[in-house]
Amino acid sequence: MPTEQTCSRCRAVVMQEFSRDSAPEHFKAYWGQTYYSVLCISCADHLMTLHERVKGCPVPAVGMPLQEGLHFEMEGLNLVFTEAYHMMRGHCCRSSCKNCVYGLGAHQAI
Ligand SMILES: [Zn+2]
């Protein structure tokens, strides 16, 4: 019996872990920046799609406007950065952001 593993992102039990080796190079580079060790297929898929979408889109320079919907969303009076924004930035800011894509989000226990 193989030992049961859980996805570092959604905590689902992973029967077959997504293999780092099968990931495209650019995604492997991103993955290296995260705290995820094991990813399930659906989380890997979600992150890869997002990564593909923001590839080549840097975050706007300081002083440049951010786009609502792309970079942030308003939740009540709070400005919440999107997963896409965090992905574009390319590294974790360790602030337990709600939409952290590096494994240190507020809802993601490490
Ligand atoms: Zn998962």
Image (cartoon, rainbow, N blue to C red):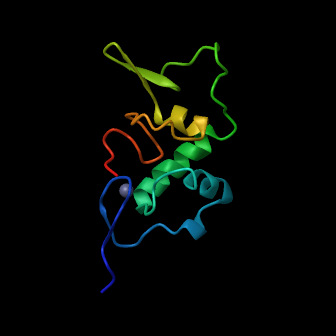
Of 14 and 107, nearer the camera is 107
Q: Residue furthest right?
A: 56
Q: Give the residue at x 33% y 83%.
A: 2
Percent across and percent down for residue 31 are 55, 54
Instruction: Tell which of 60 and 69 is nearer to you.
Output: 60
Image point (65%, 41%), residue name: 55
Q: Is residue 69 left or right of residue 62?
A: left
So how many labels did they put on this image? 0
Ligand 1 image-quadrant field: bottom left
Percent x, y of residue 36: 45, 56
Report the front residue among 22 and 86.
Answer: 86
Q: Residue at x 67, y 21 (%)?
A: 61
The image quarter containing residue 38 is: bottom left
Which quadrant would the N terminus be assigned to in this image? bottom left
**46 relative to 24 in the view: left or right:** left
Q: Is residue 96 above or below residue 108?
A: above
Q: Is residue 7 above or below residue 101?
A: below
The spot of residue 57 in percent (x, y) is 66, 33
Residue lying farthest front?
94
Instruction: Give the left or right position of residue 22, taking residue 45 as reference.
Output: right
Picture layout, residue 78 above or below residue 29: above
The picture places residue 94, in percent across and down from the top left corner, at 46, 38
On screen, 77 above or below 103?
above
The residue at the far bottom in this view is: 1
